[in-house]
Amino acid sequence: MEPRKHRTWKDAFELVKEEIEALLRADPFQSAIGILHELQRRYPGQFAGKLKRTLQRRVQAWREQNILDSPTKIPSLRELLPKQTKAGQIEEVHTAC
């Protein structure tokens, strides 16, 4: 059976997509939980806590698209740590500081 290429449910955040992006532009590093709490405050009863993971994925995708591709990208810990080769040797990491 081939995987679906379409959604089987309505996007719970479609109507507030621009608000979410505005919150992220104002503070790109605020948590998805904080955004969810803000949406719950603004729209009581509309956004259940079970939507947390969905919003986390959306926030992560926004950050990857808007922050990680920027020239002022902050390197992740994984990028800063030395890499191990198959033989177990550690490669030297050069960073431009």
Image (spheres, grey):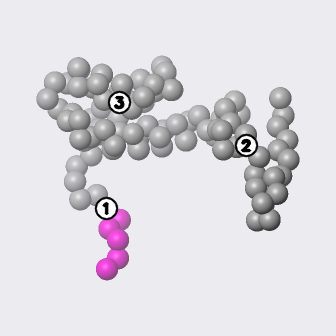
Task: Please indicate whether residue 48 sits to the left or right of residue 84 in the image.
Answer: left
Camera sees residue 91: yes
Q: Which residue is mark 3?
A: 33
Most prominent secondary structure in the magenta stretch?
loop
Q: Which residues are magenta?
A: 1-6
Q: Residue furthest front?
A: 88
Give the SS element for disc 3.
helix
Asked if residue 3 lies in the magenta stretch, the reply is yes
Q: Using the numbered discs, state the Cα–Cα distance from disc 1 to disc 3 in whole angstroms.
A: 26 Å
Instruction: Identify which residue, 65 or 15, lies in the foreground.
Output: 65
- Element on which disc 1 rests: loop
Determine which of the numbered discs, if any, sits on residue 6 in the image: 1
Q: Decide whether residue 60 is among the magenta residues.
A: no
**Mark in front: 1 vs 2:** 2
Sequence-wise, which precedes: disc 1 or disc 3? Answer: 1
Measured as percent of width and height from the top left, residue 8 is found at 23, 59
